[in-house]
Structure formats: C-alpha cells, structure tokens
Image (cartoon, rainbow, N blue to C red):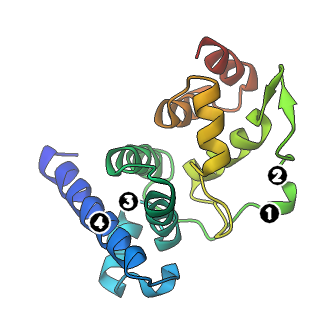
Amino acid sequence: MNQSSSENWKSSFRSLFNLAVDHYRSGKRGAASYFSPAEIAELAAFGYRAQELYDFAEDRVKYGEPDLETALAIAGVRREYFLQVQGGKLTDQRIDMASLPPKDASVAGIVWLPRILVKAKAKLRGEMPDDLMYGCGGDRKFFKENNVDPVNFLRAVWKANGDEQAVIDFVKRG
C-alpha cells in the first residue's frame, strides 16, 4: 500500500471522527443517522462500521477519551487486520454478548482480562455487536491499571494468534 492511500484513509477517518463528535455535541443520537451512504462506504473500505465510530465519538464527548489519535490508531490496527488477514472482506458475524466473560472474571489474577481478550479478538475481526465497544470505560480502566496501551494490546492479541499465555505475559510486562 502506498503512502498516499495510507494517508487518505487516515484523513477520511479524522474527518468522520470529527463529524461524529460534532453530531454528538449537537444532540444528534444514533449511529444510523450520522453518516451518508458514501461515508459508510468509506468506513467499510477500512473494515469499520458507523457504530464503532459513534461509540468513540460518544465517549470522547462524555468522558474526554479516547482522543482522535487513539481512535485512529485503534482503527489502524483493525484496518491492517482487515486488509492482511481478511483480504478486505467484511463479515456479517457478531459475537454474542451473552458469551462474554463477566466483568469481574480474571485470569492469572488480572481482572477484566478474559473479557477484554474476547473483545479485542472481536474488534480485530470486525465482529463487535452494536452494544459493545472496544475501549469503553471498563477497558480504559483495565488499560490504566495495567499500564497497557489499547493499541499495543490489540496488536499483542493479533500477534498471539490465540496464545492466551502470550497475552497474559504482555499484560504482566505492562
């Protein structure tokens, strides 16, 4: 992929993120009303759905995070996975919310890790249901408590390729 197309998607993402933040600040609610069909196609071209961007905008306005660059970096990891692993093909599948580990579940003494591990895999694959967000308040608390960057965590989950111990070790290195 050349530098120009790499910068084009980033520019598009930045514009759409800012648009979503503006919509949210103005009182507009619901991802379905935020973007035109052309903008939804732009998002789909890098493996994203309107709901994912809406969630980032909502939390940005309500809680001050994630900032644009963090949202862009997370989208960048998803985009790389989408293009390299999924061959640029979107999936219709969504994980079942009922299958998520409970919020208080732990592994190796690390609370929230079982839950965020499932969420990170779903984020990479583009299988997040509309009611779930990678980088929500609970996730941000986990990242802060474990001194882990959300972008690097997503990359570590991808690199681990199902090896839970590798992810546990990554988090423990914090």
Instruction: Report the Cα–Cα distance between label 3 and label 2.
Output: 26 Å
Give whichever of discs 4 and 3 has the lower sequence position.
Answer: 4
Tag 2 residue: 100
Q: Is residue 29 above or below residue 127?
A: below
Give the percent coordinates (x, y) of residue 70: 39, 44
* Residue drawn where x is 56% and y is 28% of the image: 156
> Does residue 80 appear anywhere in the picture?
yes
Q: Is residue 75 left or right of residue 14?
A: right
Which is nearer the N-term, disc 1 or disc 3?
3
Of the two numbered discs 1 and 4 in the rendering, the one whose residue sits closer to the viewer:
4
Please name the residue that numbered disc 3 is placed on: 46
> Are the two marked residues, 2 and 4, in contact with CB atoms closer than 8 angstroms?
no
What residue is at 62 percent from the left and 49 percent from the top?
137
Q: Return the mark for residue 96.
A: 1
Position of residue 168 relative to residue 41, above or below, is above
Camera-nearest residue between 26 and 99: 26
Seen from the viewer's position, the closer of residues 38 and 33 is 33
- Amino acid type shown at disc 2: Leu
Residue 121 appears anywhere in the view: no
Q: Which residue is mark 4?
A: 18
